Image (cartoon, rainbow, N blue to C red):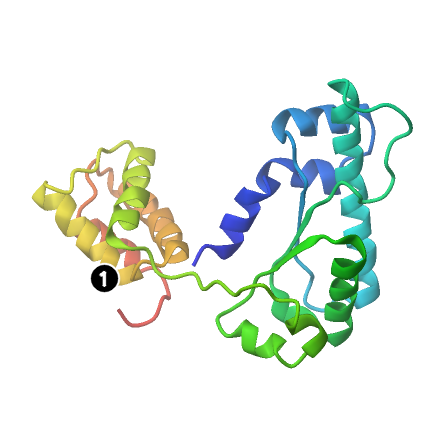
């Protein structure tokens, strides 16, 4: 439903991930990252399927420290900080953990402990029903502020997304046009407002149009793109 994409956008992780995780700490890294990623105070993290709690702790500390170094040098550059750089993650205000189903009880306790000690905000992203799974862990669950369920796109939201998809393919979407209206209806029926399916579908739409040298997005193009995907019965 676009949870991961939304979280990465919120944290500006699409701009900073390579610099923070793979880059070498120093002036070049921090200057470039803060130019592309100003004021960042969030860490986005996805544990691997078999990552141990010890490794999760180490990786979060590593990324958080890099973020704090970036923030420190940015503040120093604009004259709002003097003194030695911060080598811990004290500047991090939010941890966003994706694929939270992969966390075992020890890893969840580790995150709960960090939440308590550092007074840091914590978002856990997972599949529908994850809040029921977390309810098994009373110490963590008692600290949950709210659970938000991503829902399929409403009609206006769908049009908003499709306008940009049309534009990316060099087209202009006009819902009043019969051809465009049919194509919109086909997308809505196939994807049911699921933004991830829309993304996958339009990757194939672009391919179909390129192969067949087409200049118009029609419901036939949408159906041809749909036929190449495994997305269940629609």
Camera sees residue 210: no
Residue 167 vs residue 144, the one in the foreground: 144
Q: Residue 188, how many percent across, how many down?
A: 24, 57
Camera sees residue 233: yes
Q: Residue 34, how many percent across, how many down?
A: 68, 28
> Which residue does the image show at 50% across and 75% down from the upper left?
129
Residue 217 vs residue 16, the one in the foreground: 16
> Which residue does the image show at 22% across and 50% down from the upper left?
221
Query: Left or right: where does residue 41 sit relative to residue 146?
Result: right
For residue 101, what is the image quadrant? Answer: bottom right
Label 1: state its secondary structure: helix
Which image quarter is the C terminus in?
A: bottom left
- Pointer 1: what residue? 189
Judged from this view, the residue extending furthest toward the left is 178
> Which residue does the image show at 21% across and 43% down from the upper left?
217
Number of dots carrying numbers: 1
């Amino acid at each position: 439903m676009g949870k991961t994409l939304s979280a990465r956008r919120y944290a500006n992780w699409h701009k900073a991930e390579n610099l923070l995780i793979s880059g070498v700490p120093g002036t070049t890294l921090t200057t470039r990252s803060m130019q592309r990623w100003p004021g960042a105070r969030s860490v986005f993290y996805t544990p691997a399927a078999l990552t141990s709690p010890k490794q999760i702790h180490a990786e979060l500390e590593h990324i958080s420290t890099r973020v704090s170094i970036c923030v420190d040098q940015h503040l120093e550059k604009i004259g709002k900080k003097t003194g030695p750089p911060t080598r811990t993650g004290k500047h991090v205000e939010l941890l966003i953990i994706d694929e939270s189903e992969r966390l075992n009880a020890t890893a969840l306790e580790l995150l709960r402990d960090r939440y308590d000690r550092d007074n840091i905000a914590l978002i856990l992203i997972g599949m529908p029903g994850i809040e029921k799974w977390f309810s098994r862990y009373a110490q963590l669950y008692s600290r949950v502020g709210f659970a938000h369920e991503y829902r399929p796109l409403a009609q206006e939201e769908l049009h908003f997304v499709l306008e940009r998809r049309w534009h990316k393919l060099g087209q202009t979407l006009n819902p009043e046009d019969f051809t465009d209206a049919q194509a919109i209806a086909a997308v809505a029926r196939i994807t049911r407002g699921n933004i991830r399916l829309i993304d996958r579908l339009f990757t194939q739409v672009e391919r179909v149009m390129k192969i067949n040298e087409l200049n118009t997005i029609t419901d036939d193009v949408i159906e041809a793109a749909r036929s190449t995907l495994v997305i269940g019965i629609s």
